[in-house]
Amino acid sequence: MMYRELFEYPDNPASEEEIDHIKRWCGSFLPQDYLRFLRECNGAETPKGSASPDDSVVLWGAMESCELTEAYCYMDYIPRTLAIGSDGGGESIIFDRSQGETPDNWPIYRVPMGDLCLESMVLLAASFKEWREAGFPLKFENA
């Protein structure tokens, strides 16, 4: 169980019903590494060994991602996105589903919840796998 070991506070695994729900909600497949995360810990907080104290990553569970993407109207402002977490404050973490030839190549961005627009997006990684391999940084030093 790789993902459970990467976080201080992992949640319980997602059920197949929850995974089916997020797949249907997106209308597409999901990145394999993200599916593995959901199957191991359906949400988690605080990556172990974070490079910066500002890297307070909170990854939401499958149902929460769908509900909050809809509740905060992400797709009204940044179409084809899926919010998957936050910094525990005012910044959200999103997949940009409009980029990448396959879901495994959907880039991960950070964007302020109060300024949902393309111009405010900060690239975190080219994929969920790349972001995991880098230790889930939020890159505030480059902002």
Image (cartoon, helix red, strand yellow):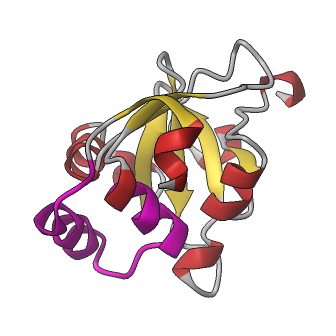
| Residue 113 percent coordinates (x, y) | 47, 29
Give whichever of 65, 40 is nearer the camera. Answer: 40
- Kindly identify the residue that appears in the image at 66 percent across and 37 percent down: 120
| Residue 137 percent coordinates (x, y) | 73, 35
Position of 136 compared to 87: left or right? right
Vertical placement of residue 63 versus 19, above or below:
above
Vertical placement of residue 73 versus 133, above or below:
above
Magenta segment includes 89: no
Position of 100 compared to 4: left or right? right
Image quadrant where residue 136 sits = top right
- What range of the chain is rendered magenta? 13-38
Query: Which residue is at the far left?
Result: 17
Image quadrant where residue 9 sits = top left
Position of 41 compared to 103: left or right? left
Vertical placement of residue 12 versus 88, above or below:
below
| Residue 55 percent coordinates (x, y) | 67, 23
Query: Which residue is at the far right?
Result: 142
Magenta segment includes 34: yes
Image quadrant where residue 130 sits = bottom right
Q: Is residue 80 visible?
A: no
- Kindly identify the residue that appears in the image at 48 percent across and 54 percent down: 78
Give whichever of 37, 71 is nearer the camera. Answer: 37
